[in-house]
Image: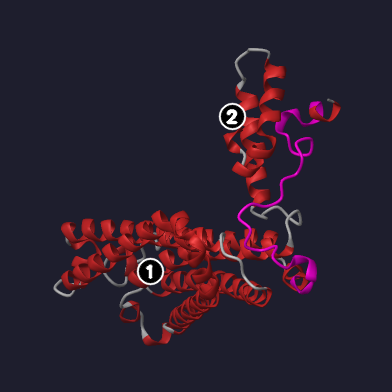
Amino acid sequence: MIRWYPADWRARYGAEMVALLEDELEGTTPTVGLRVSLALAGTRQRARSGGLPGDGASPGLRVQTGALIVLSGWAVVVLGGAGFATLSEHFMEAQAPQAQALARGAFTMAVALALCGGALVLVGAVLALPATLRFLRSGGWPAVRRRVWCAVVAAAGLVGATIGLAHWARHLTFHERNGGDVAYTVAFLAWALLVAVALGLLAAAGVAVGRRITLERSVLRAEGALAIAVSSFGTGLTVATGLWWVAMARGAPWFRVGTRPGTRPTPVTLSLVLVECCLVASSVVVVLRRRTHRPGAVRRLTSPDVAGAAGVDGATSPGLPDDGGPFAQQGDGS
């Protein structure tokens, strides 16, 4: 049951926790409530070890953790943005020229935000490259090898599938590409699933490396500023997509539904809902990032006492009485 707690916490307090559980249970079967309580306490401790909950961790660790959260969120943004690019194909042809201003402006804003955010993510990767090379030269490759190879294989498969699907799509009409050809629709859904898997594996590989490297304070400050900007771009992209949706619902509601022009069907489609859900989920990441990565944490990186605090794979480990799960109060009295 204590496997819910992080490995470093178990190594330090696991034996004491097991002894406490055995004394309290006296050979009886743990109740569901106890198991749930231990799971919640262990999850909180894992979050605390990663610098998530407030100011418990060092400023450097919280900034680095926040940047990694934003990286994961940007993978969701890319997934939603790819879906939006597909859904908005040829949207200008569906509206009258006098009704195109809002949709065109929202689409242009979405593209600009996506390009800027992607560029900043690449800048962050380049800044972290020297620390990554130091980590690999010092023998860190075995710790991340499996995740990196999985990401590479998935990315290679995605490239091949994209080339093949694009070649197929060029020989189909707009109607066939949007549900008229069953075989193409199935292939497209499989490709979308592959995109999601590849992005998830790439983000996981990036996080696996990022949480193990040690960044210089100047680089860490830059990564923190980039994370703030990228998360803001992700939120802006969500808003721009919503505005495009509203504009199309007002000017050409038949565009995504597939009915004839001039009809007024509901503009709400499953594909659009899924795209917007991906983008909203990425915006939720901004909330998590703000809990872990406040601007004050970036400013405090100038303090000498945080040198070397970032890049540590473990983190804070409060004593057992402070976060001992359901028996914390009994532990205080023992």
Report the residue at 42% width, 69% height from top.
81
Viewer-nearest residue: 143 or 158: 143
- Using the image, determine if residue 30 lies above or below residue 68: above
Asked whether 165 falls inside the magenta stretch, the response is no
Dividing the image into 4 quarters, which one contains the C terminus? Answer: top right
Viewer-nearest residue: 76 or 306: 306
Report the residue at 60% width, 15% height from top.
29
The reply, left or right, for residue 111 in relation to residue 330 is: left
- Using the image, determine if residue 65 lies above or below residue 112: above
Asked whether 309 falls inside the magenta stretch, the response is yes
Magenta-highlighted residues: 301-330
- Percent position of residue 131, x then y: 55, 71
The reply, left or right, for residue 331 in relation to residue 167 is: right
- Percent position of residue 47, x then y: 64, 49
Tell me the number on the disc at residue 141.
none
Q: Amino acid at mark 2?
A: Met
Instruction: Tell me the crowding category of disc 1: few under 14, some 14 to 19, or many 20 or more residues within 10 angstroms, Cα based.
Output: some
- Give the prevailing secondary structure in the magenta stretch: loop
The disc, 2 or 1, on the residue closer to the chain's N-terminal end is 2
Whole-angstrom CA distance, mark 2 to mark 1, is 41 Å
- Percent position of residue 173, x then y: 17, 72
Report the residue at 16% width, 57% height from top.
183
Viewer-nearest residue: 309 or 155: 309
Tell me the number on the disc at residue 1.
2
Q: Which residue is mark 1?
A: 82
**Residue 149 in which image quadrant:** bottom left
- Using the image, determine if residue 326 lies above or below residue 57: above
